[in-house]
Amino acid sequence: MSIALLGLMCAVIVILLAIMKIFLSSQIYYESRKINELRQEATALQAEHNMLNSHIEALRFKNRITDPIFVMNQEE
């Protein structure tokens, strides 16, 4: 093989490797963006879950307090 052909093959290999690297880097970037969006959504849903649990607990407490009073008023 001549030197020119060998140099051309090396250049093609380098270009192919560079294209593969660019493709993989962009795919990793887009996947990490998706992961970040899902983490943000999970954090927001967890905060909403905690808020709803505390609201449920407040309603249960209110029900326990007001229920005996309601029963006592009906007996009178």
Image: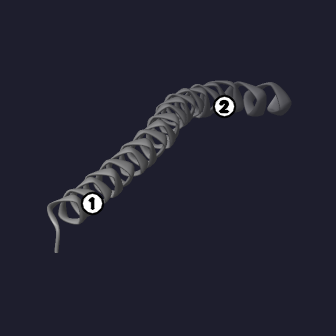
Q: Is residue 26 above or below residue 75?
A: below
**Residue 46 image point, x, y percent:** 49, 36
Image quarter where the C terminus lies is: top right
Residue drawn at (63%, 25%) of the image: 62
Residue drawn at (64%, 29%) of the image: 59
Image quarter where the N terminus lies is: bottom left
Disc 1 marks a residue whose amino acid type is Ile
Q: Residues within 10 Å of mark 1 (few under 14, many from 20)?
A: few
- Give the alpha-carbon distance from disc 2 to disc 1, as whole Å: 74 Å
Q: Is residue 5 above or below residue 50?
A: below
Disc 2 marks a residue whose amino acid type is Asn
Residue drawn at (44%, 42%) of the image: 26
Residue drawn at (77%, 28%) of the image: 70
**Residue 40 image point, x, y percent:** 49, 31
Q: Residues within 10 Å of mark 2 (few under 14, many from 20)?
A: few
Q: Please indicate whether residue 34 sits to the left or right of residue 64 in the image.
A: left
* Dot in front, 2 or 1: 1
Q: Is residue 15 above or below residue 9?
A: above
**Residue 14 image point, x, y percent:** 25, 53
From the image, tell me which residue sits under label 1: 13
Q: Closest to the observer: 10 or 23?
A: 10
Residue 6 is drawn in which quadrant?
Answer: bottom left
Q: Secondary structure at mark 2?
A: helix
Q: Please indicate whether residue 6 sits to the left or right of residue 35 in the image.
A: left
From the image, tell me which residue sits under label 2: 63
Q: Please indicate whether residue 17 sits to the left or right of residue 37 in the image.
A: left
Q: Closest to the observer: 42 or 2?
A: 2
